């Protein structure tokens, strides 16, 4: 019996190649599984998250060290202005506080400007107090004190900023308080309108419509539920008053009794 060594050698070589190929495929698959399910999750902290802390209101100089303790970073991507926070305080953040992020995530922040932006002073001369209030608010300014002077018309005669007269279109810091020099209407006295029983919004319309000034507001009892109304006013209804005078209000639920402490 004769053996064909060429055929046998050919079969053995092909089998060895197939075995080697299968082993190589197995090694590649094993390494792929090891990389994606063992090495990569370990490097990227797969499945591990960090809760973003609240940094709004914090000075930007504190933020870096504060976030580093939480394994986070930050980047300033915007600046704006708010008079509710000091300069260089964080106004907004993204992602927001409470969000879940990966370790070393960058938090983008908006920072309060050192100097507020300026706005042109609107012209309030010959405008009523209630009209001046509306114009100031629309221009992101505040009304300061009212100085009454003898003048037959209850309108604005002059605008003052930090004790000096200010001209229309002069640029001043946004959020500034503007004092108004107002005519007393010829010192004519009139009777205070009755505000008792009115809602606060309706009372303000009557106060400002009479060119009076809203004074101190005292809350009596629990005013969260129901519809609170004016329980008391000072000066009282029908008392004589002049343009620009202050009216104080006591607000509470209808029928709420006033105590001696409330009257103080």
Image: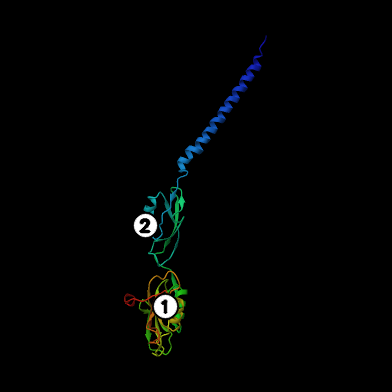
Residue 178, horizontal then vertical, whole percent = 40, 77
- Looking at marks 2 and 1 on the same chain, the residue that comes earlier in the sequence is marked by 2
**184 up-or-down from 69: above or below:** below
Compared across the picture, whether 162 is left or right of 139 comes to left
- Which residue is under mark 2? 61
- Is residue 169 visible from the viewing direction of this image? no
For disc 2, the neighbor class at 10 Å (few under 14, some 14 to 19, many from 20) is few
Farthest residue, direction right? 1
The image quarter in which residue 196 lies: bottom left
- Is residue 79 visible from the viewing direction of this image? yes
Residue 24, horizontal then vertical, whole percent = 56, 29
Residue depicted at x 65% and y 16%: 6
| Mark 1 secondary-structure assignment | strand
Residue depicted at x 61% and y 22%: 15
Residue 63, horizontal then vertical, whole percent = 38, 55
Residue depicted at x 37% and y 57%: 61
**195 up-or-down from 6: above or below:** below
Q: In which quarter of the image is the C terminus?
A: bottom left
**94 up-or-down from 237: above or below:** above
- Which residue is under mark 1? 230
Residue 80, horizontal then vertical, whole percent = 44, 64
Return the residue nearer the eye: 194 or 16.
194
| Mark 2 secondary-structure assignment | helix
The image quarter in which residue 184 lies: bottom left
- Figure label count: 2
The image quarter in which residue 168 lies: bottom left
């Amino acid at each position: 019996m004769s053996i064909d060594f060429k055929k046998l050698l050919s079969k053995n070589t092909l089998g060895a190649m197939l075995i080697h190929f299968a082993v190589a495929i197995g090694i590649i698959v094993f390494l792929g599984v090891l990389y994606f399910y063992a090495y990569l999750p370990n490097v990227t902290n797969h499945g591990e998250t960090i809760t973003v802390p609240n940094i709004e209101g914090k000075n930007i100089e504190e933020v870096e060290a504060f976030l580093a303790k939480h394994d986070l970073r930050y980047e300033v991507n915007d600046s704006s202005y708010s008079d509710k926070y000091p300069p260089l305080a964080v106004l907004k953040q993204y992602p927001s506080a409470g969000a879940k992020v990966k370790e070393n995530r960058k938090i983008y922040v908006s920072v309060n400007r050192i100097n507020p932006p300026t706005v042109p002073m609107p012209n309030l001369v010959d405008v009523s107090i209630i009209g001046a209030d509306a114009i100031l608010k629309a221009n992101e300014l505040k009304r300061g004190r009212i100085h009454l002077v003898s003048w037959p018309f209850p309108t604005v005669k002059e605008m003052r900023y930090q004790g000096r007269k200010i001209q229309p279109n002069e640029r001043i810091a946004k959020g500034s308080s503007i004092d108004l020099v107002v005519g007393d209407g010829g010192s004519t006295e009139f009777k205070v309108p009755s505000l008792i029983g009115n809602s606060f919004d309706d009372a303000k319309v009557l106060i400002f419509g009479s060119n009076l000034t809203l004074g101190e507001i005292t809350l009596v009892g629990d005013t969260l539920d129901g519809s609170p109304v004016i329980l008391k006013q000072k000066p009282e209804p029908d008392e004589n008053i002049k343009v620009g005078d202050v009216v104080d209000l006591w607000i509470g639920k209808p029928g709420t009794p006033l105590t001696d402490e409330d009257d103080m």
